[in-house]
Image (cartoon, rainbow, N blue to C red):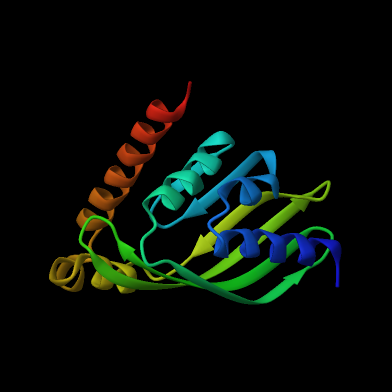
């Protein structure tokens, strides 16, 4: 097993324990992150996102598998089940991740998942009827960004 496979395994093991500090240690300081909700995050924003999600996690569980990595790139499949804090609805999000590595750390992390599938679970009928629409995506993204900015402001001392 390549050392970067171990790194990704360590990242998700920390994630299972909601150990955001452990997750952040797997990243390079100049980490770039992307997912369909938060879109592009950089550096300390990425760590703040994981800390915020940890703080809000309810009924959280995570499974991961299919970790593959070489010296430069890697991938994994993971599934998170949790209660979405805004609506109290249970969500199982099925995610494929891609990574790039540098100097034994993750320097680029990209998660992909079906936004409409996620929104149907998280938002209920609104997600079912409109989760595919750019309007709902834009609103969800704006709220996620606002929440992250507020979390960063409240926790940067």
Extreme-top residue of the structure: 157
On the question of residue 85 being in view, the answer is yes
**Which residue is at 37% across, 67% downward?**
59
Q: Position of residue 125 (x, y in %)?
A: 13, 71
Q: Quadrant of the N terminus?
A: bottom right
Pick whichever, 114 or 26, lies toward us: 26
**Which residue is at 47% across, 25% downward?**
156
Residue 109 occupies which quadrant of the picture? bottom right
Q: Position of residue 128 (x, y in %)?
A: 19, 73
Up-down: is 44 above or below 75? above
Q: Position of residue 67 (x, y in %)?
A: 70, 73
Up-down: is 143 above or below 15? above
**Which residue is at 79% across, 61% downward?**
4
Up-down: is 43 above or below 84? above
| 149 to the left or right of 21 | left
Q: Position of residue 91 (x, y in %)?
A: 33, 71
| 55 to the left or right of 136 | right
**Which residue is at 85% across, 62% downward?**
3
């Amino acid at each position: 097993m390549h050392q970067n496979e171990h790194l990704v395994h360590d990242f998700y093991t920390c994630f299972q324990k909601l150990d955001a500090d452990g997750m952040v240690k797997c990243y390079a300081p100049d980490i770039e992150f992307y997912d369909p909700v938060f879109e592009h995050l950089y550096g300390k924003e990425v760590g703040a996102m994981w800390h915020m999600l940890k703080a809000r996690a309810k009924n959280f569980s995570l499974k991961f598998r299919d970790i593959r990595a070489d010296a430069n790139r890697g991938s994994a499949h993971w599934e998170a089940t949790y209660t979405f804090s805004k609506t109290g609805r249970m969500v199982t999000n099925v995610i494929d991740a891609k990574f790039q590595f540098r100097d034994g750390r993750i320097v680029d992390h990209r998660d992909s998942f079906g936004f409409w599938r996620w929104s149907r679970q998280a938002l209920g009928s609104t997600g079912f009827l409109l989760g595919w629409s750019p309007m709902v995506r834009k609103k969800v993204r704006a709220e996620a960004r606002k929440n992250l900015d507020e979390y960063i402001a409240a926790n940067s001392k």
